[in-house]
Image (cartoon, rainbow, N blue to C red):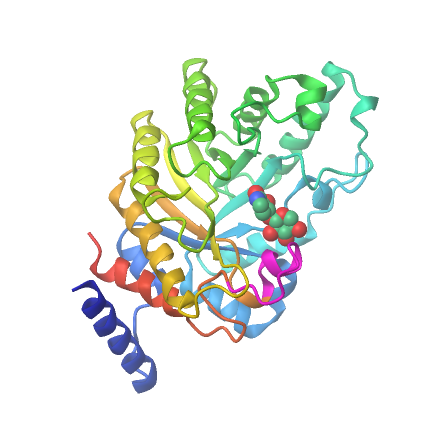
Amino acid sequence: MRKLVLLISITALVWGLTSGQETPSLRDLATERGLFVGAAIQSEYLNESDYAETVAREFNMIATEWETKMDAIHISKGVFDFNRTDRMVNFAEENGMAVRGHTLIWHRQFPTWLDPNDYDRDEAIALMRDYIYTVVGRYQGRIQYWDVVNEAITDNGTFRTTPWYRMIGEEYVDLAFQFAHEADPDAVLFYNDFAAEAMNMKSDTIYNMVAGMLERGVPIHGVGLQAHLTLGTTRTGSNAAVDEVIENMTRLGELGLEVHITELDVKFSRGSDPRRQELQAVDYQNMFEACLAVDACTTIVTWGVTDKYTWIRSDQGIEDAAPLLFDENYQPKPAYFAVVDVLQNGS
Ligand code: XIL
């Protein structure tokens, strides 16, 4: 039955596209559902008309993929460069889009000029406070959502020994959220991590960590599940099994937290099944259905716009990676139509 619905949806959509009839975009469908559907963007590509038009047409939210991280903004001691983030935030405002600021405190893209050994605990706390006040304060009211702390927990449920952990200790997480809230009391503040979508040791640790933060009165408002998936991992028993993702999102919602799927992409290994794009569509369908099934899940962001600029090609060196909704020529893929089907016909 579902394949029939999907076929009808694709046919209707293709007919609409070819007949010039206005067909609903992802943005239209998401907005109708009160959902944010976003994409991580890079400022340099906003100069490409196809890129800018696709983002503005298909998404009602942007995330800042790498240019709002500490090494890109805090370029030397006391020196900040906001040009690229300004470009992205201006674009979002010009197109009526929400913004997820990614990310304030992370162990990667940590400034090379900043030697943790140069700072005692109080100096490190002052450095963090100054940085967060400067960045969050600048975008007060313009960046509505922040990934305040990213990837603080390891796969086996321990604190990652990041530079911030080494300088300040576990309390760096609470302090980061406190400073972000002081800088913009209206911003919605998230803890963000990967491989913690389903029920596992890491997601249990994160659940217990954020529950403790709430008990201490720390201003945390949500958890981001990155969802960097590999083909088929949303199937039952896999590491992002959709039934367990729903269970995990539900328990986070019961804490009063919002849940965002923050960095969704679905990669496949070389030489995998020739039907891989259809299999990829199933994983995207599963994640969107999971989000729709849980009231606390309000947002799904794909980690990029077009396969042409995916980080999996640039950072992981997989030249033919095709993890996103649009191909190199900005053409919608089966995964796009699967998402449209969920948003049009899902529960
Ligand atoms: C990646 C970006 O996509 C790259 O452009 C950058 O070079 C490195 O960071 N988890 C995260 C993101 O939280 O910040 C990472 O983004 C991907 C993994």
Q: Tell me if residue 40 comes above or below residue 199 in the rendering.
A: below
Taking the image as shown, residue 225 lies to the left or right of residue 150, namely left
| Magenta-colored stretch includes residue 316 | yes
Residue range (magenta): 309-322
Q: Mainly helix, strand or loop, the magenta region?
A: loop
Depth check, front residue: 285 or 81: 285
- Residue located at (29% from left, 33% from top): 250
Rendered position, 180 above or below 43: above
Quadrant of the image containing the N terminus? bottom left
Position of residue 40 in the picture relative to residue 273 (left or right) = right
Position of 3 relative to 164 (above/below):
below
Residue 336 percent location from the top left of the image? 38, 65
List the single residue furthest toward the left: 1
Q: Magenta stretch: residue 196 in it?
A: no
Relative horizontal placement of residue 14, taking residue 222 as reference (left or right):
left
- Most foreground residue, 104 or 324: 324
- On screen, residue 20 above or below 143: below
Residue 125 appears in the figure:
no
- Tell me, yes or no, if residue 247 can be seen here: yes
Q: Position of residue 193 (x, y in %)?
A: 51, 36
Report whether 4 appears left or right of 251.
left
Q: Position of residue 202 (x, y in %)?
A: 47, 29
